[in-house]
Image: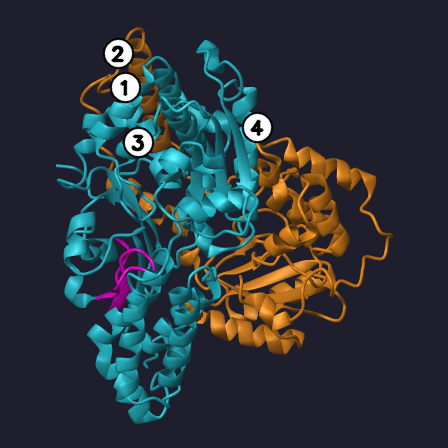
Amino acid sequence: MTDTLTPVLTDNWDADRSWTLDSYQAHGGYDALRIALGMDQDDVITAVKDSGLRGRGGAGFPTGMKWGFIPQDNPKPKYLVVNADESEPGTCKDIPLMMASPHTLVEGVIISAYAIRANHAFIYVRGEVLHVIRRLQRAVQEAYLAGHLGRNIHGSGYDLELVVHAGAGAYICGEETALLDSLEGRRGQPRLRPPFPAVAGLYAAPTVINNVESIASVPAIINNGAEWFAGLGTEKSKGFVIYSLSGHVTRPGQYEAPLGITLRELIDLAGGIREGHELKFWTPGGSSTPLLTDEHLDVPLDYEAVGAAGSMLGTRALQIFDDTTCVVRAVLRWTEFYKHESCGKCTPCREGTWWLVQTLARLERGEGTEADLELLLDQCDNILGRAFCALGDGATSPITSSIQYFRDEYIAHFEHGGCPFDHAASTLFAPAGAHA
Amino acid sequence: MTLRETQDGGDMVSTDGGAAAGAHLPEETLRELREITERYPQPRSALLPMLHLVQSVEGRVTARGIEACADILGISAAEVSGVATFYTMYKRRPVGDYHVGVCTNTLCAVMGGDAIFDRLKDHLDVGNDETTDDGRITLEHVECNAACDYAPVMTVNWEFMDNMTPESAVELVDDLRSGKEVRSTRGPRICTWREAERVLAGFPDDRADEGPAAGPASLAGLEVARERGWKAPEPSRRAVTGGREQGTESAAAEADTSRAESETRLEQSPTDVEGGKDEQ
């Protein structure tokens, strides 16, 4: 019987100076690199395929399969790009990982780049996390000095250059093709696919783009074996992941568990919902994944079950809102975010998110009518599936799901002539026992 | 991002009043800008860090900074300007010594970010994206900064200030204005905005070892696991599926042994979340 929580990626976060090479190596760090360098590259890819590792950045695409798409007969250089642009509202797992143990990521980068025969790799990290960038810069510097990076790594004949690249503030750069444009020194706007990055990515050369947590999971797979990894989790959602609990729970934070744990279990581990209150709604994987409610407390948090419940596992960004929270206010704020972050490339998203804000703001002020709800759903219908990338689709998720579950609350706004909630009651510093 | 520039009006090149110190950037800056291009297989990839470096020298993105980037990369100033206006972190107006961000995305807003932002606007007598008269503080509401388990979250020069209240926010900006040394709740001593921009350009400072490894929320699950003796299962076999294992078996065995040893050590040692020996 596997334990409820299974610290692997988070296991060394409480070690003294865990971000340093010395500490990381004292805990077995870079052993996996030596194992991998003794393996054939294709065998490393096979190990990752056999492990069942799926992308941890939200989409859940099988990582090993992505690596296998790199055409090795293509004469161009191959590139590995780590998507460390963690910006999806609610998502807060990669930042603490890179802060506490940047070498886990660096080691994963080296093994992964070796597997796909890349001699250049990049960590594209959002710019607004200065200390994380410092720790990454230091880790890369230490790895070079230790011979884990650079020319002829540990006598293997394999060369790798790794660059830490800071972004400059743009949610859209978490979209992998926008990230590539940004990394090429352009406005971060998504590219039409095909061609997919595996064929024509960075500088139109074969490129693998993986999330931080995906790449950071690779050393453990190499160290402990694909079977070990595949033995955790559920049938189609294998391995362990970091679940991020935030909001109205007693102990918000990072909880690493095999895929398939339920929110009920996680909330219990986190000391329950804030005292005196009840769960109202939550996001399973960031604001772009449709809201769920207390009906869904026992849904296994894996890719399949959350999908079957009408949402998406996404980044396991579990934002918990209790009964003091106005869902209309929450959804309006997310919608303003999507409007602000729309890159402007396609009309449905650029114009649509603007109209969504207009309509929602009117509803939130209590100036709308029931017809506005239909208008809002019609606007969503004109964005979903018609936008150039997933940003537009994501913008509709909180709106359509909140109307599905909380239609009455929208209506209460115009019956009440404004928001019926006391916003102060939702705050962290609200007096105990405050109620909406 | 893209919509922000319309609030300010005008384009970055033409509204720039020109930096005081002559038409060209200092030679040292030009040399460093060129140095950044050498990190990449194709020079234009350097543009984002180059613009961070321009801000570290100029206090914002200036016309001459744009010209310098364009000149070095062999592209037009309009192309550079097009990039500079796309990203939220690039500023056309002078930024204060301390850029103070308040997260007002949904979760932080609900948990108190809205109240904090309102209080700071009042206290500092500035609006969003404005700088105090003494040039010390630029206040901006920011989007989700990937620290939701510490909500409500603020940033100072992109360092985390966790679990804030309106009162602690006022105290923070007062300390910053009075020149008192301020530390991130999960990071180092706060540097100036220009110094921060230099690190973002890829020129590290010496503060990586300051601050803890992780804040309390980052360790919440790990603490529960330690208390209850929960661990990831031990691997049942020594080698990797699909591996050719020539000469790697002993390495793998060693790896497992050292891992087991380290786990034992960890159990015995008290958790040290304060970290940062240099800081003490």
Q: Decide: is B278 above or below A317.
A: above
Three-letter amino acid code at disc 4?
Gln
Q: Could you tell me how far apart the alpha carbons at marks 2 and 1 are, in whole angstroms?
A: 7 Å
Write the start and end of the magenta stretch as one range. A269-292
Report if the CB atoms under discs 4 and 3 are less than 8 Å apart: no
Which residue is disc 1 drawn over?
A43
Q: Position of residue B209 (x, y in %)?
A: 58, 37
Which is in the foreground here, disc 4 or disc 3? 3
Count residues near mark 4 (Cα–Cα under 10 Å), then give few for <14, some for 14-19, many for 20+: some
The answer to which image quadrant residue A84 occupies is: top left
Q: Main secondary structure of the magenta part?
A: loop
User: What numbered label is drawn on residue B220?
Assistant: none
Q: Secondary structure at mark 2?
A: loop
Which numbered disc, 4 or 1, marks the residue that appears first in the sequence? 1
Q: Could you tell me how far apart the alpha carbons at marks 3 and 1 are, in whole angstroms?
A: 15 Å
Which numbered disc, 4 or 3, marks the residue that appears first in the sequence? 3
Which chain hosts label 2? Answer: B
Q: Residue at x 30, y 9 (%)?
A: B250
Q: Could you tell me how far apart the alpha carbons at marks 4 and 1 are, in whole angstroms?
A: 29 Å
What colour denotes chain B? orange
Count residues near mark 3 (Cα–Cα under 10 Å), then give few for <14, some for 14-19, many for 20+: some
Which residue is disc 4 drawn over?
A141
Q: Residue at x 22, y 83 (%)?
A: A408
Which residue is disc 3 drawn over?
A69
Q: Could you tell me how far apart the alpha carbons at marks 3 and 2 are, in whole angstroms?
A: 22 Å
Q: Could you tell me how far apart the alpha carbons at marks 2 and 4 are, in whole angstroms?
A: 31 Å
Which chain hosts label 1? Answer: A
Which residue is disc 2 drawn over?
B244
